[in-house]
């Protein structure tokens, strides 16, 4: 299935692939529309009764089509939902995660999973090096891709947007920074992360309102970007819950 393998095919057709019963249920619950459903009744356990054009497959054919194992006999081609910065609906004290030039779809999927748990307003991917409709991203997010608004844009566009909406920019970096827990995240906040190999570009460092770091006490000098993002997101959650309880 070319939609699973080629980002160009996904862009040209305006479709992407969702595999698995759980992921598909969450996709539908979040209002996405199905184009075509491929399912195997012997694996799925019943007949497909939902929306979309239906193609029934034998177990052998399904196993050849499936991108991964354990998808419970159902794969769907889903209509892309185009989002822009201007389409985002922000809360009174928005919490946004910004990822610059993220490379690995699995990392972005894991960030979205934490973002759903922390109820962030959006994940913004700047100058992306991976397709946000990559099947590995959808899988690793365990359905959070559908519940968390995810937007792609340039870094310059994102910086302008954050400043227009009075959202403070906190860049995660080792140099010239303070511990993350010493920084106020109770106001509108964007947590900005770079790549593990090169970190953030200079334009983000200059645009930042504050630089924050996660203290590293061992021999390594960095964490996986999804782990770092989760730590910082839930520090914002902690601070905001403490404020609400006061």
Image (tube, rainbow, N blue to C red):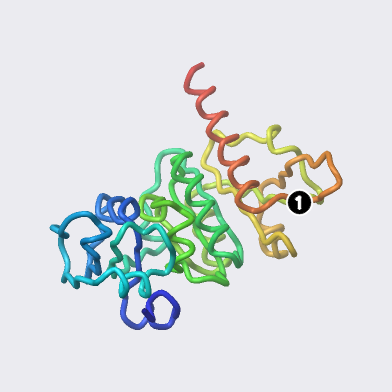
- Residue at the location (49% across, 68% down)? 153
Residue with the mark numbered 1:
222
What percent of the width, then of the height, locates residue 56? Answer: 19, 71
Task: Please state the horizontal and vertical placement of residue 90, each as a whole percent of the image.
Answer: 40, 47
Query: What residue occupies the far top of the structure in this picture?
Result: 246
Q: What element carries label 1?
A: loop
Quadrant including the N terminus = bottom left
Q: Quarter-wise, where is residue 85 in the image?
A: bottom left
View extreme (right): residue: 219
**Horizontal and vertical percent for residue 177?**
77, 45
The residue at the point 36 percent across, 74 percent down is 65
Q: Is residue 93 left or right of residue 197?
A: left
Q: Residue at x 17, y 70 (%)?
A: 54
Q: Which one is nearer the viewer's eye here, 219 or 115? A: 219
Asked whether, in this view, residue 204 is left or right of residue 76, the answer is right
**Residue 188 image point, x, y percent:** 51, 41
Q: Is residue 50 left or right of residue 152?
A: left
- Vertical placement of residue 89 versus 218, above or below: below
Q: Using a 10 Å C-alpha cutoff, classify the residue at mark 1 as few (fewer than 14 neighbours), some (14 to 19) or many (20 or more).
A: some
Res. 72 image quadrant = bottom left
Q: Is residue 30 left or right of residue 4?
A: left
Specify the quadrant of the image occupied by residue 9. bottom left
Please give the count of numbered marks on the rendered protein.
Answer: 1
């Amino acid at each position: 299935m070319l939609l699973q393998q080629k980002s160009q095919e996904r862009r040209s057709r305006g479709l992407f692939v969702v595999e698995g019963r759980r992921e598909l249920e969450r996709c539908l619950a979040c209002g996405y529309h199905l184009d075509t459903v491929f399912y195997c009744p012997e694996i799925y356990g019943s007949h497909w009764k939902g929306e979309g054009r239906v193609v029934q497959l034998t177990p052998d054919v399904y196993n050849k089509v499936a991108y991964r194992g354990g998808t419970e006999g159902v794969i769907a081609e889903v209509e892309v939902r185009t989002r822009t910065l201007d389409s985002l609906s922000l809360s009174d004290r928005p919490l946004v995660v910004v990822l610059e030039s993220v490379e690995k779809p699995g990392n972005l999927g894991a960030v979205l999973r934490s973002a759903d748990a922390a109820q962030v307003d959006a994940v913004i991917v700047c100058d992306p090096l991976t397709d946000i409709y990559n099947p590995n991203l959808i899988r690793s997010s365990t359905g959070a891709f559908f519940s968390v608004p995810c937007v792609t844009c340039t870094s310059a566009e994102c910086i302008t947007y954050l400043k227009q909406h009075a959202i403070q920019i906190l860049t995660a970096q080792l140099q010239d920074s303070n511990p993350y827990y010493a920084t106020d995240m109770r106001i509108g906040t964007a947590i900005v992360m770079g790549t593990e190999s090169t970190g953030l570009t200079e334009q983000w460092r200059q645009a930042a309102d504050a630089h924050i770091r996660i203290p590293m006490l061992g021999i390594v000098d960095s964490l996986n970007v999804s782990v770092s993002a989760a730590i910082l997101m839930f520090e914002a959650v902690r601070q905001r819950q403490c404020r609400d309880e006061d």
